[in-house]
Amino acid sequence: MNFDQDNIKKILLETGYLEKSDIAIAEKEAQELKLTFVDYILNSNLLNRDLFGQAIAEFLDINYLDLNSNPPVRELVLELSEELARRYRIVIFKRTPEKVIIATDNPDNEALIHEGIEELKRVLNVQDIEIGFSLTEDIDESFLFYRAKLETRFSELTSSGKIVTSELLAEIIHDAIIYRSSDIHFEPQKTKVLIRFRIDGILHEAGTMPKDYYENVLNRVKVLASMRIDEHLTPQDGAIRFELNKKFVDLRVSVVPVIEGEKTVIRILSVYVRNFSLTEIGMSEENRIAFELSSKKPFGMILVVGPTGSGKSTSLYALLKELNASSINITTIEDPVEYKIEGVNQIQVNQRTNLTFANGLRSIVRQDPDIILVGEIRDQETAEIAVNSALTGHLLLSTFHANDAATALPRLLDIGVEPFLLSSTLELVISQRLVRRICENCRYSQEFSAEELKRIYPSAKKFFKSKETFYKGKGCPSCNNTGYKGSSAVFEIIKGTTEMKDLILKNPNSNEIWRLAYAQGSRTMFEDGLEKVRSGLTSMEELLRVTKPLEF
């Protein structure tokens, strides 16, 4: 069956999972947010992904097989050849002596119905084949069992004796995308090069490469990124639009000299913003309301702070998607433009043409903007222009490097922003960190007494109740035996209240800012994260990895 948008609406109506009024609202909201209908309903409270899959399965009158919650066993998957599995888009879900249950995302496939089932009976030596429906992303994830280790594929590629530099690079980038990596690290050692992927904020070893082959791969990267291949002693930066399986992936490249050669880090950028809402990125209802209320002000400044890789840009883009409308002029200046949003004017910083944050921002204010996003405030000049832009009738959004929300304000004052300007423009400061989500498939609970918790986590002892239930992941094929799958964010917010603006005029330190914010109802990242620990979204160990209770 062709699962296009119109068919999906028909299915959801006929199966009773959505009413006509729900469909109408979803269509209107999806159009305003520039999302597809399916993306909208899956990111709203209308349906979760499993109910969506269940609706399609009911319409087709077959069972829904949830491969996310019940991942297939590796040995079963590998009973089918990769060629056969990919040809019919099938995975073995369960097997008994009499019957094999097959999961597919295309159960109406004519070839599967008329030829495939008989072929499967012969291959699997079974009399009965039952077909069930699974979501496409779950079928694709099951196909990961067919991927050999990088070293194995490297050996196969290099054994031919041909020049395979492009193929080696493609294999590495393909793996990184499959495993949802944000960065690829090539780290030269004495005789080999270690390849690591950053997944959900943590680096994992992906494989190694002989040093001789790395030189060719590095030169290939430099050529694609418009770098000098004869320069080995100074850092270089560049960008690549890499074609993989007829799709383009944007990459940002950094090369720096190290003792054993040149280290390369490739950041993988999404071509289009992921369909995250503020709720989906982990923002509590209270914090989300504060964020949205501030964003509806006609002018002022909203800052999102945190270290590199803490999800600052994702939060701002989630907000931009909600603000994006035909009646509003939104202009951004970024380095790089990480996500492209239709309807938003996005400017890429270019040092070669002197298009810096400061120079670009000067031009933007002459472009009649309603909302301005500055990718990052890095220096006094950019900070001053940004603050003045917020003061003269524009809503300004930006990121800034600071350890927490309270530290951001003294830092801005330290780099030269006048206290009266910051006081006049500040609407909200948000600090955040990313925590890994516990894998839902292998999550289990543990009950602790207050005494046990104080002994295990002494730094957080004042936050524990008389008894607590916390969660962990055992590790399973679905999460690559890590116990974690995906990520969420923990937040803290300081509002630009009248009292806070008065305090800024006095050049306060971070402790003074936190005392006032706390008295006005703000909660720290640790406290926000502790609620996520109690709900089973993440673990106590993961929360303490990224933040700790504040003393002020």
Image (cartoon, grey):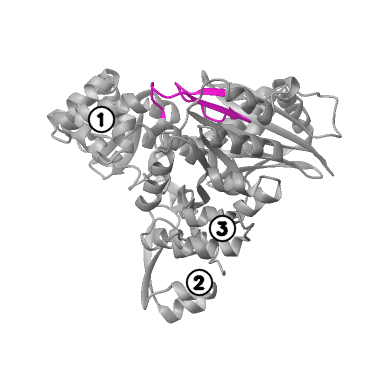
Q: Tell me the tag on residue 503.
A: 3
- Circle 3 crowding by C-alpha within 10 Å: few under 14, some 14–19, many from 20: some
Which residue is at a point 29% across and 19% down the rendered structure image? 111
Which numbered disc, 3 or 2, marks the residue that appears first in the sequence? 2
Q: Residue 219's quadrant in the figure?
A: top right
Dot 2: element? helix
Which residue corresponds to mark 2?
460
Which region shows up in magenta? Answer: 324-346
- Residue 190 vs residue 86, the one in the foreground: 190
- Circle 1 crowding by C-alpha within 10 Å: few under 14, some 14–19, many from 20: many
Residue 430, placed above or below residue 29: below
Q: CA distance from mark 3 to mark 2?
A: 29 Å
Q: Is residue 503 left or right of residue 91?
A: right
Q: Tell me the tag on residue 67.
A: none
Q: Amino acid at mark 3?
A: Leu
Dot 1: element? helix
Picture coordinates of residue 151 (x, y %)? 64, 38
Which residue corresponds to mark 1?
26
- The quadrant of the picture occupied by the N terminus is top left
Q: Is residue 16 left or right of residue 544?
A: left
